[in-house]
Image: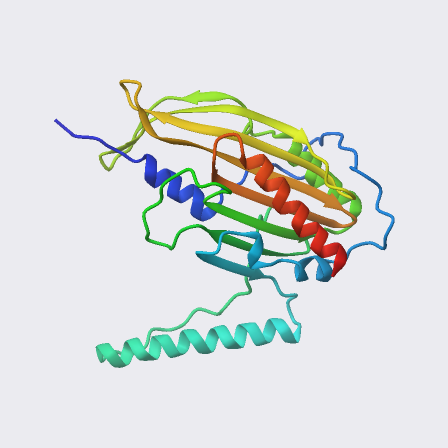
Amino acid sequence: MLTLRPARVTVAVAALLVLAGCTADATAPAAAPSASSTPTTAPLTFEAVTAALSETLVPAATVRRCDEYEPGTPEAQAYLDQLAAEVAATRAEEAAATGGAATPLPSPTLPQCGNPQLGDLRAASVAGHAFALGDPIELPVAGGASRAVEVYEMPDPDAAQTAVGAEAADLEGWAVDKESARVNNGDGTYVPRTVISGAGVHEVDLPGWTAWVLTRDEASFQDDGSPAADPYSAAHLWAARDGLVVRVQVVGDTPGQAAATALDTAARFVTAADTD
């Protein structure tokens, strides 16, 4: 008889590493958010906000920064040249070690940060994990096992508000209480029965910004009803101001706490952006 093994941890790790979002089509009917307060200062710029992207906003064990470049600019060309040189050096070392010819190299490409479906002009992000890649993960972790902060420059303020409104509409039903039956995988593993609870979408107070947070708790159970893993919470906070959109993602937090963690992270970030 085939013995099935739980793949619950594998699924959780994948969610943490990619910080899977709850995206929706930015052209979908939007919710009707109202700004927490009306900005009285000059409009924020993409450069000012990305300057506030700090490693202190995310767990520090593994941190990755991503910056997009405008094609054709000196900065973009410098990035491509450096990437091509690094890849060529690595391939040459491999060829020398194996005695074979170096394989042809694909053309280097500019980085893509965040959600490519948002319709932004450019983006930047910082993501961090409370564990080193390859290390075992025990959830939950107070403050989140993984957090990410993303900044998007939109074509105009209306596009920013529309994008955040579409996410707040939660058309995919990510922030909805539900239960999923056990799923058997083809490799002899399985995903235990999953229960989503405490889910919802809430407008939050982020002064000067229109902000919504989507949150949920996740627990999993074996066939006999025993826990398959400790429960944890996740949240996605979306905020708009001027022509900018910010997303804060939290995964693997203490049950019921991810929304508060996301709001605290967003507040520290936008405060730093306002003072830079």
Furthest-front residue in this view = 142
Q: How is the image coloured?
A: rainbow
Residue depicted at x 56% and y 43%: 249
**In the rendered view, does 84 fall on the left or right side of 191?**
right
**In the rendered view, does 116 fall on the left or right side of 274?**
left
Furthest-left residue in this view = 1
Q: Is residue 23 visible?
A: no
Closer to the camera in the image, 12 or 186: 12
Residue depicted at x 75% and y 32%: 33
Residue 94 x %, y %: 29, 75
Residue 70 x %, y %: 66, 65
Residue 104 picture quarter: bottom left
Residue 161 picture quarter: top right
Residue depicted at x 48% and y 58%: 63
Q: Is residue 275 visible?
A: yes
Quadrant of the frame with the N terminus: top left
Residue depicted at x 37% and y 38%: 11
- Relative to 224, does residue 91 appear above or below in the rendering? below
Residue 212 x %, y %: 67, 35
Residue 259 x %, y %: 58, 35
